[in-house]
């Protein structure tokens, strides 16, 4: 196996009652695992085998090599999503990120409102992200497997809004799933780490 299924950073029941062990079990051990397996089949014997996963996403996107791109992006997106959640979350950021949310979105409540609006209005399957883009933060939603890694922006946090992420627990009420993520699961420390790394890279480039 060229690419490995990353381990979940917590037990399968750790996100209950907001995400059930059944949902997390299917999502990780069926959906995420299948993307990794399909990726390994698609890259077998190709130049992609020797690349890091991020490079595979960018190179296959440029070449419009869809089976590789879709499965590589989904493999990466899911790992990023597991890390975007923390069973001990109180939903509140601290540090420089809290200040930036105030400046950019008018505070945590307004950030939540805008993130929820983007996630709920995303038609069909996709992902909602908080990204760093130059001096700014932004909320974007992407379709299907699409990832900010194919742009000049840096992802800080993501929410999977494919139906498989929430249907067993919330049926078609995506809005309740988004509320649970923002209020009880979001891993702001993870986002802060990515923001710090992004700002360090920017300083070094100047
Ligand atoms: Fe998913």
Image (spheres, helix red, strand yellow):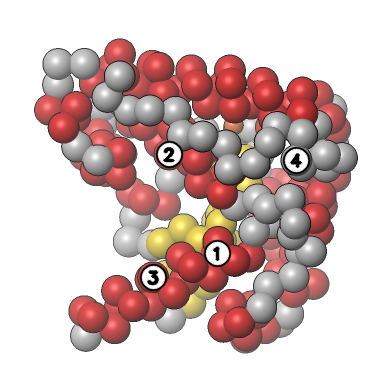
Q: Residue furthest front?
A: 11
Residue 21's quadrant in the figure? top right
Across and down, in percent, residue 91 comes to 76, 64
Q: Is residue 126 visible?
A: no
The residue at which mark 2 appears reads as: 76
Label located before the other in sequence (4 or 3): 4
Across and down, in percent, residue 183 comes to 81, 58
Residue 44's quadrant in the figure? top left
Mark 4 vs mark 1, CA separation in Å? 20 Å
Label located before the other in sequence (4 or 1): 4
Badge 4 marks a residue whose secondary structure is: loop
Q: Quadrant of ligand 1?
A: top right
* Badge 2: residue crowd in 10 Å (few <14, some 14–19, many ≥20): many
Kindly indicate whether the residue at mark 1 contacts the one at mark 4 (C-beta within 8 angstroms): no
Across and down, in percent, residue 140 comes to 55, 56
73 sits to left or right of 57:
right
Kindly indicate whether the residue at mark 3 contacts the one at mark 1 (C-beta within 8 angstroms): no
Q: Is residue 151 visible?
A: yes
Relative to the observer, which residue lies in front, 57 or 93? Answer: 93
Kindly indicate whether the residue at mark 2 contacts the one at mark 4 (C-beta within 8 angstroms): no
Identify the residue shown where x is 39% and y is 62%.
153
Rendered position, 26 above or below 195: above
Residue 14 is labelled as 4
Identify the residue shown where x is 68% and y is 24%.
25
Badge 3 marks a residue whose secondary structure is: helix
Badge 2 marks a residue whose secondary structure is: helix
Mark 4 vs mark 2, CA separation in Å? 21 Å
Label located before the other in sequence (4 or 2): 4
The residue at which mark 1 appears reads as: 191
């Amino acid at each position: 196996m060229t690419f490995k299924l990353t381990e979940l950073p917590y037990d399968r029941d750790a996100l209950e009652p907001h995400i059930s062990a059944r949902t997390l079990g299917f999502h990780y051990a069926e959906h995420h695992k299948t993307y990794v397996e399909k990726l390994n089949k698609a890259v077998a014997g190709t130049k992609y085998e020797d690349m890091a996963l991020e490079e595979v996403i960018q190179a296959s996107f440029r070449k419009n090599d869809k089976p590789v791109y879709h499965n590589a992006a989904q493999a990466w997106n899911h790992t990023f999503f597991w890390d975007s959640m923390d069973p001990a979350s109180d939903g509140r950021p601290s540090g420089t990120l809290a200040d930036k949310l105030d400046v950019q979105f008018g505070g945590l409540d307004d950030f939540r409102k805008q993130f929820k609006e983007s996630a709920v209005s995303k038609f069909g399957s996709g992902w909602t992200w908080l990204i760093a883009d130059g001096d700014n933060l932004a909320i974007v939603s992407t379709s299907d497997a699409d990832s900010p890694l194919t742009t000049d922006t840096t992802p800080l946090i993501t929410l999977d809004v494919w139906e498989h992420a929430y249907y067993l627990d919330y049926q078609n009420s995506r809005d309740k799933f988004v509320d649970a993520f923002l209020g009880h699961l979001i891993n702001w420390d993870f986002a802060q780490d990515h923001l710090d790394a992004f700002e360090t890279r920017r300083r070094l480039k100047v």
